[in-house]
Amino acid sequence: MFTLPGQTKVNRKRWTVMLYMVTSDKETGRSVERAEITERAAIRDIRELQRVGSTDDVNIVVQLDRRWPGYPERYLIKKNGSTPLGSVAGVRNNSSGNPNALKGFVDWARKEYPADHTMLVLWGHAYGLGFGRDHGDALTMPEIRKALDAKEGYAIDILGANACAMCYAEAAYELRNAATFLVAPEVTMPFAGWPYETILRRMTRSDMKPDALAEHIVTDYLDSFGRDNVALTLLDLTKAGDLRDLVKALAVALKSGINSTRTGKPVSEAFLDTAHGSVRPLIDLVDLCERLADVDSEAIAAAAAAMKVFLKSGPDKFVRQYEGDPDFEGLHGLGMFAPSVTGAADLTRLEITPEEYNKLALVNPRSNPWSEIVHKHLREALAPINQAVAEVVRNTGATAVEERTGVAQLLVSVYRSFVKLDEALVSAQKHVLSVVDGNGASKGLGATTGKSNGKSNGKTNGKMNGRNIAPNAEFGPPYLRLAPRYRQTQYAVVQATVDATDATTVVASETYDARLRQTVAPLAELEDALANVERTARRVMTNQRFGLGEDQVKAGLGEDQVKAGLGEDQVKAGLGEDQVKAGLGEDQVKAGLGILSLRIATDTGSRSASPIGTVTAMYRQVALALQLSEEAVAKIESLVQSLPMNGSGYQDGNTKQRWMDQVTRSFRELRDMVDNAKSTTVSVLLQPTYGLGPSPQTTQGTVSREQLAIAGGLSSRVLRLM
């Protein structure tokens, strides 16, 4: 035992919990407002800690840095109160971004409050490849590693991040010797943060080991939010050492194939399509590997497959546990840095130069070309899109680096969702016409024609173009959600023949044509792509910070055209006389059909119109355009199901041609509806007053964007695929 000045003797306990809380922000303007919000959240979490407090088994110590008094202070958390332990010696008016501030806190807590196990929680804002961007001097990963300076057998048991987007490969490798487990999100973390009371009560009720506690933290965190719009990952950092060779192998393969002109999906598109968390430059590493499987390169495919196997989550794995909202499609819990997928260099939110990035152990350029790929080759490949997006972003009112990047990644996600829909439309039309024409099997299911009991006798692997579809997949739900509910797998055809023994007797026999079932996969993929557009549009428009809503009139949107990279050619910033108009004065807003119009009553100068009504009408525009697209897909599916087959063909050649023309015409109508949905969505996003850009947390009062989206019809109540 030992004695602290003014304290009682402290025994060694089972756990010491350390919270390094940073809310300090010495800047002015919007950042001060953000600091006030984080400071209130910090006080709220400290009060939550006090509901349990330090016990006979657990010590809880906090180092809090806030705008006032402007330097870190330490507290011992007790039940229903805290004991101030004074300011930190030697760091008055210093920033918590100084690695010595973190090192001093951890060393002090380990010495003065010894325990069998330790947990350190970094509480505050992340800035991507580091922690604590609110004080102008963020902690980089090398600085965190040096501050923790783990001695042999003395690593922190659990390193937690009560901060956004800190679970990425570079961090895991950098901190592999600093902690045993890392618990951090790949996505945004709400201000409510960790459920500290629940976690602490678990620690005090039983002799819980670090691995079990870390697993409970993940589950408790998800449960505390009803698993809605949150995710958390548990990494076993003792297994992070293998990352280096795997990343190097993938980077070497990518460098040789990124500019390949062979057929197959370009590497740049695989990166651009990859799912991401809350910060676009941090793309999901597993999802990237899955998309690289479509690139025409055996070397890339092999390296991506090896990485994917390593990142498979489970007990005794590197990714020990990942839990997230099911709506986070494509996320698997671990990100990696790829700045060029966000936009031009001036949009990079992570505020890290290539030179600083190259200091990270995982991507040291002396032995690993990953940095060269993501900073140089990807930027060159994606330059046209990046330049177009950057030009639009400059006219949305976004001024700070973080704001420009946030708007850019939202625009890119909308753009890519429509690109995928266009690709699915072309593919579906090709395969459906092939089936109608009778040119054989499509999408992996063989054609079978002949007498049967209504069940196909064809053998398949149950997979169509990567989709798990049973061999007897019926044309309708659950595979096709928009198709009529007449469930079947084949065209049933009745043929009349004359009985050979009695010329006066006509015999009717059934045959089955499996071509109907061959259209299930391409049409299902078309539905999936349209559903992705719907979800992306809603996610972007209801984005808490940049979504639709009242804000100052955005500067720079005048008569000039702004290339959006999202429309057919150019989208007028004012949306002009001959473009689809969104929320400009008393003008009618056309949904793409001459007979349809929607009026938005708003006056951007006087603000006499209701912002709530205006924004709701903007959601309604997009919902209507997407609903028309759904109806066009449903028409195609109904038409395909009703094709009048006769055995393996049609009654005559003219009949087949008429049906092929009708199918072609239906796909043309769908193309018109998709183009209309694209232009409508873009025009709404670029609306000068209420469109995409920096805006308050809520649209007006207590009415959330989610509520306005539902009121406007951009919801599963109206859209069947959402």
Image (cartoon, rainbow, N blue to C red):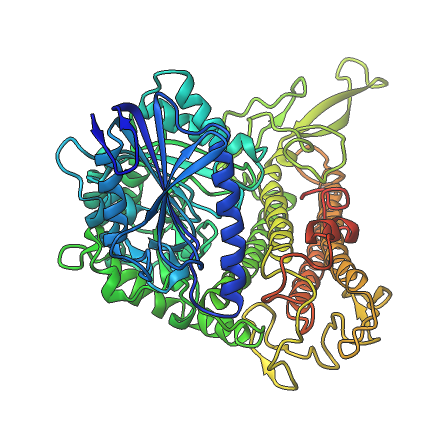
Q: Is residue 439 above or below residue 620?
A: above
Hey, which quadrant is residue 347 in on the image? bottom left
Residue extending farthest bottom: 559
- The image quadrant where one finds the N terminus is top left
In the image: residue 433, left or right of residue 498: left
Residue 223 spot, x, y in % from top left: 54, 30
In the image: residue 354, left or right of residue 600: left
Residue 677 spot, x, y in % from top left: 69, 60
In the image: residue 583, left or right of residue 453: right
- The image quadrant where one finds the C terminus is top right
- Residue for point 47% across, 43% down: 330
Q: Is residue 142 above or below residue 230?
A: below
Q: Is residue 590 above or below residue 303?
A: below
- Residue for point 54% across, 41% down: 442
Counting labels gives 0
Residue 595 spot, x, y in % from top left: 87, 65
Foreground residue among 13 and 362:
13
- On the question of residue 348 being in view, the answer is yes
Hey, which quadrant is residue 545 in on the image? bottom right
Foreground residue among 299 and 457:
299
- Residue for point 47% across, 27% down: 52
Residue extending farthest top: 501
Foreground residue among 28 and 113:
113
- On the question of residue 193 being in view, the answer is no
Hey, which quadrant is residue 117 in on the image? top left
In the image: residue 18, left or right of residue 45: left
Residue 304 spot, x, y in % from top left: 30, 44
